[in-house]
Image (tube, grey):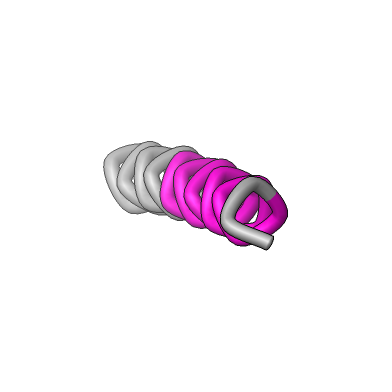
């Protein structure tokens, strides 16, 4: 049971990092478009 909770916590952290990277790349993409125009 403890290992299951630990695994879920690890997955949640990984997913949050994924969302963070996605948001960061989106910001860079938008600012890059702003620079081209």
Q: Nearer the viewer, residue 10 or 20?
A: 20
- Please name the residue shown 46% across and 44% down the image: 21
Total marks shown come to 0
Q: Does residue 19 appear in the picture of this structure? A: no
In the rendered view, does 10 fall on the left or right side of 31?
Answer: left
In the rendered view, does 28 fall on the left or right side of 37?
Answer: left
Q: Position of residue 34 (x, y in %)?
A: 71, 54
The C terminus lies in which quarter of the figure? Answer: bottom right
Q: Does residue 28 appear in the picture of this structure? A: yes
- Please name the residue shown 55% across and 44% down the image: 28
Residue 33 position by quadrant: bottom right
**Prevalent SS, magenta region:** helix
- Please name the residue shown 53% across and 56% down the image: 29
Highlighted range, magenta: 17-34
Q: Position of residue 27 (x, y in %)?
A: 65, 48
The image shows residue 30, relative to residue 3, as above or below, that is below
Q: Position of residue 17 (x, y in %)?
A: 46, 40
- Please name the residue shown 58% across and 56% down the image: 36
- Does 20 appear in magenta? yes
Q: Nearer the viewer, residue 18 or 35?
A: 35
Q: Nearer the viewer, residue 6 or 27?
A: 27
Among all residues in the image, which is located at the extreme front?
37
């Amino acid at each position: 049971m403890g290992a299951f909770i630990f695994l879920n916590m690890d997955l949640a952290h990984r997913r949050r990092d994924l969302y963070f990277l996605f948001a960061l790349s989106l910001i860079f993409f938008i600012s890059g478009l702003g620079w081209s125009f």
